[in-house]
Image (cartoon, rainbow, N blue to C red):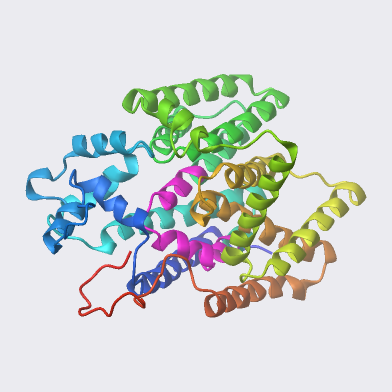
């Protein structure tokens, strides 16, 4: 069962519009901010800081802290310097935020950074569709998988969180897609393919340091499969592209090395005792915490449902692999395995327990479960099950929005004081 390219593009456009409209509704009802969301605006726009010694910060102080002044519009040097001082993230995303904010000097609005997330999410959904289409060779399956993520709590949460993680996820999926495209060309990849891959490597590295881990994982698998397929010509070009892209990122922002190795978002954030009991306890605690996060974002906030689906997925894979003797295609392996390893690795090294650190893996994790469900219906040969899959996913997504509140919405209720005006920001 399939649909034409023309119909799939129309349906994909509808999915993207509806998904972003839904996220916009949640954004309109967002009543507060995570402190990092306000840091997004400060680090992108201003060298000013707030008074922290007990003095009063006026409204003007906050405007100076969060917005671009008339004299600092399109001042990317200041953006660059802010990231050096902060020493947590590279500057590209902040440059995007600064560009939007520079069009509206002396103003603060949640929609400035949100507009970047909207564009990134549109790109994410397009890339996800193209990736699944390359894996399955089926427009309908790609559309179902994309829709399942587009209408998940994970998608909305990523879109309304005013940080760099939607942009990071776009570059991660773009990296996966270009790897699949180059791999399938079998030594006939075009110069433009490697040029795009190099640009993705450069911008992804300059967006968030976790991109480096994903780049390494996808690159390692690409290396192994290209050697097995004897695609040595493309492999050499691929390695050169990766090296040049990474070198360009280091030339633009050489602080990447010190930040990754010693910063509070790199290896410097790790402080695990070598005591075996401590290591096991730490591993169980971190993985367990992120399983809860995954359950909320994708499985209706029900760990038992995630456990049930995971057990069914593993059991079905064992059946396919050892009974039906069906191996996972290399394109599927290249797309899914890095996301699984990334989820586990980031769960262990993240400085805080938060869904934002694993956001880049969520589209592919959702896709794994959706494609397994589709494969199950094909194995059974029951046509009514094929029709039931999108209906089941639609109902699940609807229940999710009814029963689960996306992260980063916050509220105005407080026991500390009674707000005297609606013109205030809650952090």
**Quarter of the image where the N terminus is located:** bottom right
> From the viewer's perspective, is 285 left or right of 269?
right
Q: Residue furthest front?
A: 54
123 drawn magenta: no
For residue 7, say whether it is visible. Answer: no
x and y percentages locating residue 330 in the rendered image? 70, 39
With respect to residue 324, does 228 lie above or below?
A: above
158 drawn magenta: yes
x and y percentages locating residue 105 in the rendered image? 12, 54
Seen at 29% across and 77% down, the residue is 417
> From the viewer's perspective, is 230 left or right of 194?
right
x and y percentages locating residue 194 in the rendered image? 47, 29
With respect to residue 93, does 29 lie above or below?
A: below
Q: Residue furthest right?
A: 323
> From the viewer's perspective, is 410 left or right of 272?
left
x and y percentages locating residue 251 in the rendered image? 34, 22
Q: Nearer the viewer, residue 407 or 284?
A: 284
With respect to residue 41, does 185 lie above or below?
A: above
- Total residue callouts: 0
Q: Which residues are magenta?
A: 145-172
């Amino acid at each position: 069962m399939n649909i034409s390219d023309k119909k799939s593009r129309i349906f994909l456009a509808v999915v993207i519009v509806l998904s972003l409209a839904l996220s916009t509704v949640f954004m309109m009802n967002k009543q507060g901010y995570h402190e990092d969301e306000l840091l997004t605006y400060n680090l992108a726009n201003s060298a000013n800081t707030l008074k922290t010694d007990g003095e009063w910060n006026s409204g003007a102080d906050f405007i100076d802290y969060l917005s671009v002044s008339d004299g600092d519009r399109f001042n990317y040097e200041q953006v660059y310097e802010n990231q050096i001082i902060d020493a947590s993230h590279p500057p590209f995303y902040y440059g995007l935020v600064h560009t939007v904010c520079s069009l509206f000097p002396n103003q603060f609005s949640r929609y400035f950074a949100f507009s970047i997330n909207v564009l990134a999410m549109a790109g994410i959904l397009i890339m996800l569709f193209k990736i699944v289409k390359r894996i399955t060779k089926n427009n309908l399956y790609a559309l179902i998988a994309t829709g399942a993520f587009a209408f998940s709590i994970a998608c909305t949460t990523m879109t309304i969180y005013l940080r760099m993680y939607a942009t990071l996820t776009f570059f991660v999926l773009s990296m996966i897609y270009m790897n699949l495209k180059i791999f399938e060309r079998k030594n006939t990849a075009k110069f433009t393919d490697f040029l795009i891959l190099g640009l993705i490597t450069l911008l992804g590295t300059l967006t968030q340091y976790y991109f480096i881990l994903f780049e390494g994982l996808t690159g390692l698998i690409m290396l192994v499969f290209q050697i097995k397929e004897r695609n040595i010509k493309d492999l050499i070009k691929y390695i050169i592209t990766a090296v040049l892209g990474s070198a360009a990122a280091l030339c633009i922002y050489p602080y990447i090395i010190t930040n990754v190795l010693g910063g509070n978002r790199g290896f410097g954030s790790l402080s695990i005792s070598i005591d075996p009991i401590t290591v096991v306890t730490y591993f169980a605690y971190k993985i367990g915490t992120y399983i809860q996060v995954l359950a909320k974002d994708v499985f209706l906030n029900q760990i038992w449902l995630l456990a049930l689906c995971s057990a069914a997925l593993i059991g079905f894979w064992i059946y396919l692999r050892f009974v039906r003797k069906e191996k996972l295609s290399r394109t599927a392996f290249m797309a899914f395995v890095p996301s699984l390893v990334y989820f586990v690795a980031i769960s262990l090294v993240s400085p805080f327990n938060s869904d934002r650190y694993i956001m880049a893996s969520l589209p592919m994790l959702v896709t794994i479960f959706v494609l397994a469900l589709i494969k199950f219906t094909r194995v059974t040969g029951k046509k009514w099950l094929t029709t039931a899959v999108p209906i089941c996913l639609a109902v699940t997504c609807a229940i999710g929005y009814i029963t689960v509140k996306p992260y980063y919405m916050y509220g105005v209720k407080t026991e500390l004081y009674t707000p005297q005006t609606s013109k205030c920001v809650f952090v």
